[in-house]
Amino acid sequence: MASFMQSKEFEHFCHDVFDNLPIAVDFLDWDGKIIYMNEAFLDFLNLRQDEVKGRLVTDVNPTSKFLETLKTKRANIAERHVFPNGRQAIVHRIPIFDEEGNVIGGFGMLLFHDIEEVKELAEKYEKLDKELKLYKNEIAKINTTKYRLSDIYGVSKEINNCKEKVKKIAKVNSNVMILGESGVGKELFAHSIHNESSRSKGPFVTINCSAIPESLLESELFGYEEGTFTGAKKGGNIGKFELANGGSIFLDEIGDMPYHMQVKLLRVLQEKEVIRIGGKNPIPIDVRIICATNRNLEDMVEKGTFREDLYYRLNVLTLEIPPIRKRREDIQILINKFLIEFYQETGIYRKIPDIVMKRLKEYDWHGNVREIRNVVERMCVNSDGTHIGISDIPKYVLNKSLEKKYEDKKGLKEIVESVERNVIIEVLKDSKGNKSKAAKTLNIPRATLYRKIEDYNIDQKTFLDL
C-alpha cells in the first residue's frame, strides 16, 4: 500500500476525488513529505501544487504537528491550529497504517476553513441552549418532585420517626405544616409527602413566600387576566394554585406571607377556588397544601401578625423536623454523603480521619444539613491532600466544638493552647505515635509538629514511632 500511495495511480485518484471538494485535504508519506494537497487546501494557504509536492510538511507549514502524529501513531481530532499566514482552522491529522500496523502515511483535513465558522456554530448552539432552558423553566411550573424518602439520610430514632410520620400523613389529603429550623430539610419532606401520596402522579408546585416581592405574590399565587396591568402577558397568566390542580402546592416560608395575603389564602382554602386578578369567574381547584416555616407561628398569632383562622386551616397535620444537634448520630452519615457527592461532581476524592470526624460531630450545626454541606465542600476544596486535616476545619467550627470542654479556661491564649495540645495528643494516638502520619493529618510540617511536642511538654515516650 505504501508503494501505491507513491504511484501515479494514487495521484490521479486524489485529483479525481478531492480536487473539487470544498473541504481542504492532504496526504503525506511515512516520513512526512506531502504526496498530495487538494485545491481547497492550496487556496487556503495561497500556494501552488508544485510549491508543496514532495516537500516536508514542516517546510510548507512550520507550525504543523503532523510529524508528531506520524511518530506517536495517534490521530489528532478537531484541534485548533494557527497557520503561518495567520489563518485559523479546526484540523484532523490521521495516521494511515498497512496490514501489519506500520505507519505508511497520513491524512489531513480542515474541518473549518475559517474559525469564524466555529464561532457562528457556537453562537447558534448557545441560542438553542437558551431556548431549551426557557422551555424547561416553563415546564418546571408544573414540575414533579425531586426527592423521595430514600433521599433523606439518617439512622437516628428522631429521623426515622419523621419518615414513618410522612407515610401516615401521605395516606390522607389534609393540609400539612412542616416545622423546623433553617436547613433541616423541610423541602425534602414536603416532596416526600407528595411522592408517598395518592397525588404523586399530579403536579407538585413550589413557591417561596419570602423570596417573591409582596407586590407580585398575589399574581404568582392566583394568576391574572389579560390587560389587568401594564406589561401583563397576552392571554393572562395562570397562577400557582391552578398549576397545582390535582396535585400539591408547597408554600415555603409561610410565616413570611404578608397579612393581607393571608386573608386571600384563607378564602381559597375555604372555598376551594381561586379568582384571577382582574377576573370575575371563580376557578375550582383540588389542591393539597403543604407549608413550612422556621418561625413560631403560635407566637405570631398571639402578636397578631399571623391570622389565627388561617393557622388552624393550615396546621391540620404537623411534622416537626428535629435539628442536627438533637440527632448527632446522623452527622457522620450526612458528612459522608456530601463527600461522595463532591467526588461525583468534581472527581476529587477526600477522606476524613476519625480525629477530624470527632471534632465535626462535637459541633452543634445550627445551620443544620445546609451548613454541613457547606463546610464539607469548603474542607474538600481547601485540603491539599486526600485526607482532610484538623487545620482544614473552619476555625469557627473547631472552636465551637471544643468550647464546652474548655469553658472553664480563662483567656483566649490558654484556650487555644489547650485545644492545640489536646488535638496533637489525639492525632498522635490515632497514628500510633507515627509523627510523619500525624503531621500529614494535622496538615503541618513535621518540624513544626516536633516543636509543638516540645513546647507543650508532651511525653514523647508514649508516642514512639512504630
Image (cartoon, rainbow, N blue to C red):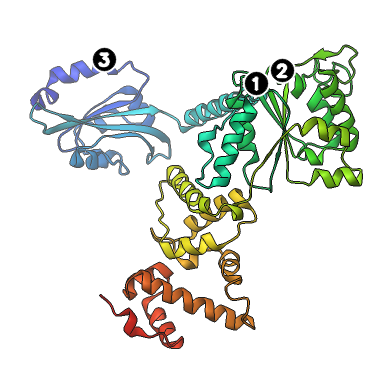
Q: From the viewer's perspective, is 360 left or right of 464?
A: right
| N-terminal-most mark, 1 or 2 | 1
Mark 2 element type: loop
Q: Are marks 1 and 2 in contact (CB under 8 Å)?
A: yes
Mark 3 element type: helix
Q: Quadrant of the N terminus?
A: top left
Q: From the viewer's perspective, is residue 445 above or below residue 54?
A: below
Q: Residue 450: which quarter of the image?
A: bottom left
Residue under the point 67% across and 20% down: 247
Tell me the tag on residue 39: none
Residue under the point 49% across and 48% down: 338
| N-terminal-most mark, 3 or 1 | 3
Please, what is the three-letter code of the amino acid marked with disc 1? Pro
Residue under the point 49% across and 60% down: 382
Residue 216 position in % (x across, y down):
83, 31
Which residue is the site of mark 2?
245
Q: From the viewer's perspective, is residue 189 above or below residue 181?
A: above
Please, what is the three-letter code of the amino acid marked with disc 2? Asn
Please, what is the three-letter code of the amino acid marked with disc 3? Val
Mark 1 element type: loop
* CA distance separating discs 1 and 2: 7 Å
Q: From the viewer's perspective, is residue 109 above or below residue 440?
A: above
Q: From the viewer's perspective, is 5 left or right of 156?
A: left
Badge 3: residue crowd in 10 Å (few <14, some 14–19, many ≥20): few
* CA distance separating discs 3 and 1: 59 Å
Which residue is the site of mark 3?
17
Which residue is the site of mark 1?
203
Looking at the image, which is closer to me, 255 or 106? 255
| N-terminal-most mark, 3 or 2 | 3
